[in-house]
Image (cartoon, rainbow, N blue to C red):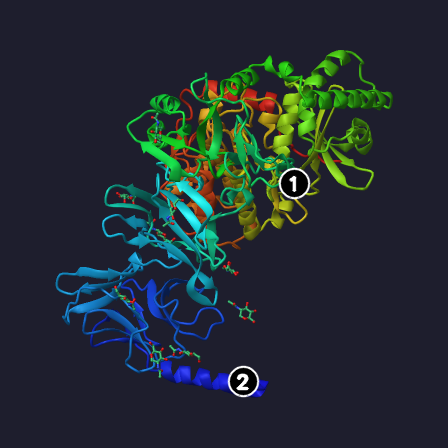
Amino acid sequence: MDASTKILLFSLHTFLLFLHYSHCKTLKTITQTLPLHDGDVLLSENENFALRFFSPGNSTHRFIGIWYNKVAEQTVFWVANGDRPINDTSGVLSINSAGDLVLQCCSNGSLPLWSTNMSTTISDNTIIAQLQDAGNFILLQAPSNHVLWQSFDHPTDTLMPFMKLGLDRRTGMDWVLTSWRSKDDPGPGNFTLRINQTGYPQLILYSNGAPHWRGGPWMGLRWSGVPQATNNFIFNISFVNNQEEVSYFYGLRNTSIFSRLVMDPSGMIQRSTWQARDGRWNEFWTAPEEQCDHYSFCGPNGNCNPDNTDQFTCACLPSFEPKSLADWYLRDGSGGCMRSPGASICQSGEGFIMVPRVKVPDTSQAHVDMSLSLRECEQKCLRNCSCTAYTSADESRGGFGCLAWYGDLLDIRTFSNSGQDLYVRVDAATLARMAKKKGSTGKWLIGVTVAAGVILVLMIVLFIMKKTQRRTRPLDTPRTAHFEDESRNMQDLEYDSKKSDLPLFDLSTVATATNNFSFINKLGQGGFGSVYKGVLDDGKEIAVKRLSKSSGQGIGEFKNEVTLIAKLQHRNLVKILGCCIQEDEKMLIYEYLPNKGLDSFLFDEKKRLLLDWRKRFEIASGIARGILYLHQDSRFRIIHRDLKTSNVLLDASMNPKISDFGMARICGGDQIEGNTRRVVGTYGYMSPEYAMEGLFSIKSDVYSFGVVLLEIVSGKRNSSFYQENPSCSLVGLVWESWQKGSSLDIVDPSMGNMYSDCEVLRCIHIGLLCVQEFAMDRPTMSAVVFMLGTNVRLPSPMPPAFAFKRIQGRSDVSSSGEKANSVNDMSLTVVEAR
Ligand SMILES: *[C@@H]1O[C@H](CO)[C@@H](O)[C@H](O)[C@H]1NC(C)=O
Ligand SMILES: *[C@@H]1O[C@H](CO)[C@@H](O)[C@H](O)[C@H]1NC(C)=O
Ligand SMILES: *[C@@H]1O[C@H](CO)[C@@H](O)[C@H](O)[C@H]1NC(C)=O
Ligand SMILES: *[C@@H]1O[C@H](CO)[C@@H](O)[C@H](O)[C@H]1NC(C)=O
Ligand SMILES: *[C@@H]1O[C@H](CO)[C@@H](O)[C@H](O)[C@H]1NC(C)=O
Ligand SMILES: *[C@@H]1O[C@H](CO)[C@@H](O)[C@H](O)[C@H]1NC(C)=O
Ligand SMILES: *[C@@H]1O[C@H](CO)[C@@H](O)[C@H](O)[C@H]1NC(C)=O
Ligand SMILES: *[C@@H]1O[C@H](CO)[C@@H](O)[C@H](O)[C@H]1NC(C)=O
Ligand SMILES: *[C@@H]1O[C@H](CO)[C@@H](O)[C@H](O)[C@H]1NC(C)=O
């Protein structure tokens, strides 16, 4: 067949299809007298969903399926005849005399390709088929509306809201997701996602019948292996485990949002929502995502930790050691770990060690007892020598129930900032060693091992290096306290030998790059120190933050923190290139951004013209994503604590990059959420609970983001208002105009009217939600990012802080606030360099 014949045939085919469709019907019900032909459409009442014949991808076969009628991209979420394709457009879906839905083709009247195949024979012409508003295709008996069959009981590759995954223990009905064979072929593929009820029920993804990824058991609020998927203001998740069924389903709090959980032909599970504005499915989470997600990647009794980037991701659980050291060295952990020889764990002083933040082991060998507390669980587990680990079965209400494992512990992984704490049985010696390690004196006692030899060698090397460096010391700093330094370094060596991925800059290099920290190179000054611009030998431009010497933190602690912070990598965060610790100096080296702070644009009469609305919106969204990463997506939770426009730097293409994140950690501030004696931050951006009581949390950052967002929209500084007239603030002004319904009055006039009212109002609305007086009312950053990206209805904001309670009782507040500002303004505010 040559090309022209092909084209001719194709045109003919299209023409025939056209002829065929030209008399197609739109139906609301299928009855025994009104079947659905290829080309017809069955719509749900709300017209959100449509059932019709279709050809997936590049296939020419016809299948009958349900898809989103209002979503631009053809998104099919249910297919009837996935493994029985039709070759042409002769397919007909009808209700036969037995009351079954049947799919037939080729007008040959023989056996149907597909059928609902109910065993009960109801010879009754009151049976109809309809597509419900949730996308459920149902067959019902008309007068009683008794549902005889529903597509939600026969999932294909997509779990829709209100559709169940699991199994009905009475009827044995399995609600299982099965992947398509390929994008062009909806037949059953290699992957199935199901709840397996062996032992304690858990979510498992199978590949050709073998476990591929484990979502783990339901821990009360979420699957153990999908910590990011919890109830939130979009999803309402339900899990049922009783005599009748074990099932999982999710509802939508706003039913006009389209959301789905789909498994693609390669076994990737993805939760996404439709974003009409961009015309695409926006992904919320995906699994499996990384090596550690592979089922039992580290074998029995191994733990996979993706954060071990410079080492092997696999490690043995305490009191275990690799079964095959050779495999272990070759980075193959699948053989797993065995109990260390001589480690007796039966009635010889054994105990438990907590392994924090993990996906709990495979529960097919586990037992649950919901009536026990964690303490009782420990006792119970301790009494039975074959019990190897335990944890709380349900983490809601502070944790209750007892989940205990017997035998090998399979498929454990560590999460960076969520997950369950697992208590693993260890022998008496390991228990004692761990207890000692916790105490501060333990360190020196381990020194008999090989590690000590390594440390000794490193020590000597470092000592020599230090000597030679000192000779070429460029700065004239006093030579005191060096002995103290060296003794401290010996403790740090153990640390050094493990973590070497943070580049250490030589003091002389940094000094040369910055012209010996000359005044000309100084970019700015803040509470934590000064910032200099520098140029390395290779021409690369850097920004050097020279921390003031007062920060009372040991070198090891400091380096530890910097290493952690340096691992945070995100498009909207300034990149840390390394650090320099020498003499009394502690410095952080960042990438240099030529465009300086957002404030230098926003509050400058000329430069603000460069920021049109689109750019401003992009900047605001970028900042939100950066903070979300710090709060949630990064390995550990970082609260910025001093978010403001001058801490948002712009790169050459005006993308926002947050700077100064993690300063509280780096400089030895308190590291947990809670109360702090030292209030860092800048007045005007500080949430009331932080300014007044020193209470900080992720919600204080949300407050600061709200202020930044309102500043971006209005082009006005919150703090300048405060100086002009302390009884009024930008936040107060916006609130007042919001209440009067004249919010657009506060929009930066330099944008002219080149903006979408609707979008600007939405940003003001979100800004007001962020600055609400009570932290618990404020949305989280993930909600903010979502609200910025979609048109969900927003709740009404409660009054902001600082809006009304202004005069009374405020004198003490403003004085403490101002003090914080002058003493601790650690801004990277950029002053003109030359
Ligand atoms: C269809 O075929 C074209 C050309 O062979 C290819 O580029 C495209 O990716 C295919 N689409 C799908 C959905 O498979
Ligand atoms: C589709 O076509 C193939 C090959 O032409 C044939 O073997 C098969 O029976 C046809 N199927 C149907 C349902 O007509
Ligand atoms: C009749 O229908 C069956 C479907 O069961 C199909 O396999 C077969 O090819 C059809 N026969 C003709 C002659 O189209
Ligand atoms: C209908 O069910 C019977 C027995 O339950 C089975 O043998 C038959 O293959 C089924 N037919 C279809 C089309 O699923
Ligand atoms: C499904 O499994 C088979 C056999 O293991 C394999 O050949 C095929 O590539 C797999 N398909 C996909 C989409 O993974
Ligand atoms: C459930 O898990 C057990 C143990 O891993 C396994 O033997 C069984 O085949 C699984 N059941 C299903 C339906 O996959
Ligand atoms: C969430 O789901 C539960 C259980 O299905 C239901 O009782 C509750 O009303 C739902 N809440 C919302 C806000 O949809
Ligand atoms: C320990 O637990 C296992 C599993 O539940 C059980 O089979 C065994 O009988 C228990 N042993 C004792 C001594 O209680
Ligand atoms: C639900 O979302 C839609 C579209 O995003 C929005 O128009 C609607 O107002 C929202 N409804 C509620 C009750 O939040």
Quarter of the image with the C terminus is top right
Residue labelled with disc 1: 330
Q: Is residue 764 left or right of residue 121?
A: right
Local packing at callout 2 (Cα closer than 10 Å; few below 14, some 14-19, many 20+) is: few
Q: Determine if residue 548 is in view.
A: no
Which residue corresponds to the image point at 40% horizontal and 79% vertical from the top-left?
88
Amino acid type of disc 2? Answer: Lys
Foreground residue among 541 and 150: 150
Local packing at callout 1 (Cα closer than 10 Å; few below 14, some 14-19, many 20+) is: few
Residue 567: x %, y % from top left:
62, 36
| Residue 573: quadrant of the picture | top right
Q: CA distance from mark 2 to mark 1?
A: 54 Å
Residue 510: x %, y % from top left:
78, 30
Label 2 vs label 1, nearer the camera: 1
- 2 or 1: tag closer to the N-terminus: 2
Per the rendering, the mark at residue 393 is none
Circles 2 and 1: CB atoms closer than 8 Å: no
Residue labelled with disc 2: 6
Amino acid type of disc 1? Answer: Leu
The correct choice, above or below, for 823 with respect to 281 in the image is above
The quarter of the rendering in which ligand 4 is drawn is bottom left
Which residue corresponds to the image point at 77% horizontal and 35% vertical from the top-left?
534
Quarter of the image with the N terminus is bottom right
Foreground residue among 553 and 310: 310
Instruction: Tell me the SS state at disc 2.
Output: helix
